[in-house]
Image (spheres, grey):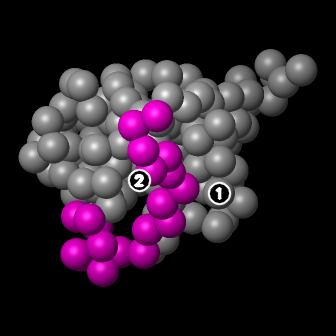
Amino acid sequence: MKLTIGCDHGGRRLKDAIVAHLTKQHIQVADIGTYSDDSVDFPSYAEEVAHQVISGEADLGILCCGTGIGMSIAANKVVGIRAAVVSDCFSAQATREHNDSNILCLGERVVGEGLALRIVDTWLGATFGGERHERRLQMITELEQKNEM
């Protein structure tokens, strides 16, 4: 499995902790930054992670910012992305099993590091349930196609 991860200045510390955690598990992680606490614009990082996931350069993506919300909004603008803001393990599992989410968004100011690492492990350990959920994903795809400009 190959992951790509990105953040803005509000999620840099959490991103660094996640990269270290995944690296210890021998999971391949492409860290696209940011690498400092200097203010940056989160949509650029969300777009890069989303494009790496859609292109197949990465299997899944993780985005961190202050709340996770801005990153999810930006990433979900890329057709085919299903980015979910998660702050608990139940939702992490459900978003993979039911929604086949392909990007996990976390908020450094919302979720502590210990819980965030458990959320990441739960999300990565869950798999899409298919069947009845597949129909709903198709409906989401149709919404994307219907509303493209």
The dot on residue 128 is 2
Residue 46 image position (x, y, % from top left): 58, 38
Q: Which quadrant is home to the N terminus?
A: bottom left
Q: Is residue 89 visible?
A: yes
Eyeballing the image, is 86 above or below 96? Answer: above
| Residue 28 included in the magenta stretch of the image | yes
Eyeballing the image, is 80 above or below 54? Answer: above
Nearer the observer: mark 2 or 1; the answer is: 1
Residue 79 image position (x, y, % from top left): 72, 37
Q: Given the image, on which type of amino acid does mark 2 rest?
A: Phe
Name the residue located 22 percent from the left edge and 24 percent from the top edge.
110
Q: In screen coordinates, is 74 left or right of 107?
A: right
Residue 42 image position (x, y, % from top left): 55, 31
Specify few, some or many for label 2: CA neighbours under 10 Å numbering under 14, 14-19, or 20 or more: some
Residue 85 image position (x, y, % from top left): 37, 30
Name the residue located 54 percent from the left edge and 56 percent from the top edge.
32
| Residue 74 included in the magenta stretch of the image | no
Residue numbers of the magenta segment = 20-38
Eyeballing the image, is 46 above or below 70? Answer: below
Specify few, some or many for label 1: CA neighbours under 10 Å numbering under 14, 14-19, or 20 or more: some
Q: In screen coordinates, is 32 left or right of 90?
A: right
Name the residue located 31 percent from the left edge and 30 percent from the top edge.
107
Q: Given the image, on which type of amino acid does mark 1 rest?
A: Gln
Identify the secondary structure beneath mark 2: loop
Name the residue located 55 percent from the left edge and 31 percent from the top edge.
40
Identify the secondary structure beneath mark 1: helix
Please state which of residues 42 and 47 is positioned toward the viewer in this rendering.
Answer: 42
Eyeballing the image, is 129 above or below 24? Answer: above
Task: Tell which circle, 2 or 1, labels the residue nearer the N-terminal end.
Answer: 1
Q: Which residue is mark 1?
A: 52
Q: Is residue 135 visible?
A: no
Q: Are marks 2 and 1 in contact (CB under 8 Å)?
A: no
